[in-house]
Amino acid sequence: MRFRFGFQSKHRQTLECSPESSSAQHPADIITLNALPDGQEGQICGIRSRGRIARRLAEMGFTPGTTVQVVRRAPFTDPILLRIRGYLISLRREEAALIVVKHQKSN
Amino acid sequence: MTDKSLLVALVGNPNSGKSCIFNQLTASHAKVGNWGGVTVEGKTGALRSDRRTFNIMDLPGLYSLSTVSPDEEITRDLIIHGDAQRRRPDLIIHIIDGCQLERSLYLTLQLLDQDIPLVIALNMFDEMRKRRLIVDIKAISGNLGLPIIPTVANRGEGIRELVDTMQQMIDDKAFSPALFRFDYATEKALSDIQEIFSNSGFDLSRGRLIGLLTNAPSADKDLPGELVGRSREVAESAKPAVGETWIDAITHARYKAISILLAKSVAPRLSRDDKLTSRLDGILLHNIWGIPIFLLIIFLLFQATFSLGALPMRGIDAGMSFLSNQIKFTKPGFWGELFGDGIVGGVGMMLSFVPTVLILLTGIYFIEDTGYMARAAFLMDRVMRLIGLHGRAFIPLMMGFGCNVPALFASRSIGNPRDRLLTMLLTPLMSCSARLPIYVMVTAAFFPKYGSLVIFSLYLLGALLALGLGRLLSRTLLTGPPAPFVMELPVYRFPSLKNILRQIGFMAGIFAKRIGTFIVFFAVFIWFLSNFPYSKVPPGSSQSPEISATSIESAESLAKRDKYIHYLGQFIEPVMRPLGFTVEMDIALVSGLIAKEAVVVTMGVLLTGASDTDKDSLIEQLRKNIPSTAAALAFLVFVLLYIPCLSTIVTLQYENRQWIWTAFSIGYLMAVAYIAAFVTYRLGMALGLG
């Protein structure tokens, strides 16, 4: 007997913050991840690419709705160190530029 | 079940403690193996119990089965397609860092769909406890339908339970993991694809179907193109319910399932280790101090390797030349010289590399295991990208300034084969310490005032050429897709010394057995070249202690210039004439192919007729015999750039396993050396340094 779980939805889900839907209200809040200042958090809206890199990013946990924090930048401001799903990961600037986030301003 | 040995694959994220578990499982029975035509060697080890033998394979770490770099492909291919005989593993041990459950379970969900029995080793269980990470293992294990064994690999905890579970899983044969269902649209597309293939008699695993749906790399391997085309049509005609692409839908669903699995687990947002890590990162990755601290660490590593390593090296040299003289004394004549000079000399040369290789690798494993290596790559990535390389290439290249042989070995820490090959091709351009005595002698003869400036320019020239050639090669021959720089920075940990020592012992074995035999072989070959046609050396002719270990001919025979190696030098003389070299310089360069140390010695013997020349008279002779300052400069440039030594070439061949690249390396270094020396000579002449 196999245990079954998972979720099913017959309806097409819309992601919480696709750039098109929210840009009208908060144009400044939707930015690419490389534009997020050090120490700030953002919520992922999506990845602007369909290649290998997009797949790898999604599999590493960069899925829509996930919170990601910019921890610091390397000297010469590239690559960027991020915290996501409880671990640290570094991306180059051009990879971070593929990720669209909603800036969650803290203070 | 018969008693045939079972294939067990160790799979896990990088830094999950995989090699530690491997060492625990196989005790000391590890050996190097090649996996079906792959150029990377892998470790396999046997675990014997009274009933059966498990053949355990330590596979390169990966985050996902849809890979982005060739080292990850080794693991993927073995799991999805099997080895050269199409044999897939009988069992997978999936090693998970307990503090990284969320991300690690993604790979678990992929492995579940492969139809191979799976057991999870929940590693670093002690740290989970320390962090008060509360995880309901029983519930997760039940929900996934597979056993989870908590382990602390570096202390050997949980290993026995792991082995018992493996036995039991093989005995039971029944393995029925949870079937993880996606949303309706995805499941519909998957079953459509399955139908296409099952109608033609292909029974594909669910993982394979998902790969076909998401157009994962290698998912269509060995499948008829027509069916793949039809499955692609299915994937394109249907619309995912979540996100825009199928991979969106699948990653979204899997991470959602993971959050349900972990819903009852408590994870404190920041543990003490995390705080320590962010505090240390504040210093070690600092905007201003980060790079200086890194350079200091590299400097210390360099000093430790090449100063500390020099002590045993001297001992080995002395011991070997003593042994060599004893042999020649007890058995004068041809056989005594063959054994004394040729073979003992060759073994001595190989052994003299062992201390530096071991010290450097200990340092590198230590840095790797603390978690700092990834930080070093993070710091240096912007700089290394100028050459078309990953940040990780910096350390091996730096070590090349000490000795190219351990540096080539150190490049093992670069995962991506393309990056590693490029690093290995550029390493010889780093001016190793064996070249320095040549610079010192020649500059003393020609640039008594500006010697250090000239030497510094040589080092700089090597580095600049590496930069230029790196850019060139990464845009022409080694274009291949660069691995995306998606690199995890693990939390800082204190490394397990036992684990490091085990790995070092393993590497020492590889070096002595595999590379060593070749070095000895070639050393004997060169000995033949420099002693044939054979003529008896008059007794009492002493050899310089410096060269006896590297098996250079005696002063008398060298002065006569009637050996093959001299013919070789005379043979290339017309080719080298445009560089302004004399035949003595050519012979010295040929002898430098064995080891660069030999160049100065050979020059001394050729020019002064004695091997125990004092420094001043050699400098005097150099000044007389090198025709011009321009030729001296060209000679220095040539020494800097032509192939470093036999041992480097042997190591290069062993480490990249493709003779075509070894041949390329020899060819391009020779060409670069020739061109650069030619330009230097012509420029020098034009500037009036004649």
Image (cartoon, grey):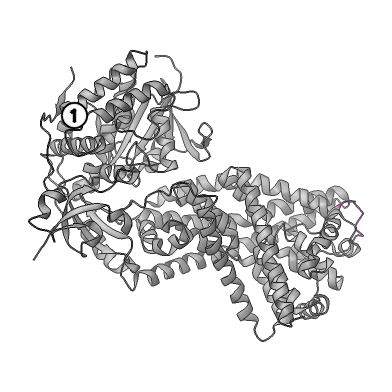
Instruction: Estimate the x, y position of residue A61 in percent, counting from the top left.
Output: 23, 45
Q: Is residue A37 visible?
A: yes
The residue depicted at 37 percent of the width and 13 percent of the height is: B201
Looking at numbered disc 1 in the image, what kind of residue is underneath it? Answer: Phe
Instruction: Estimate the x, y position of residue B505 in percent, counting from the top left.
Output: 51, 47
The residue depicted at 18 percent of the width and 27 percent of the height is: B185
B600 left or right, relative to A42: right
B624 left or right, relative to B172: right
What SS does tag 1 mark? loop
Instruction: Estimate the x, y position of residue B259 in percent, counting from the top left.
Output: 15, 39
Circle 1 residue: B182
Between residues B436 and B557, which one lies in front from this camera angle? Answer: B436
Q: Is residue B638 above or below residue B117?
A: below
Q: Is residue A79 above or below residue B258?
A: below
The residue depicted at 11 percent of the width and 30 percent of the height is: A9
Magenta span: B532-539
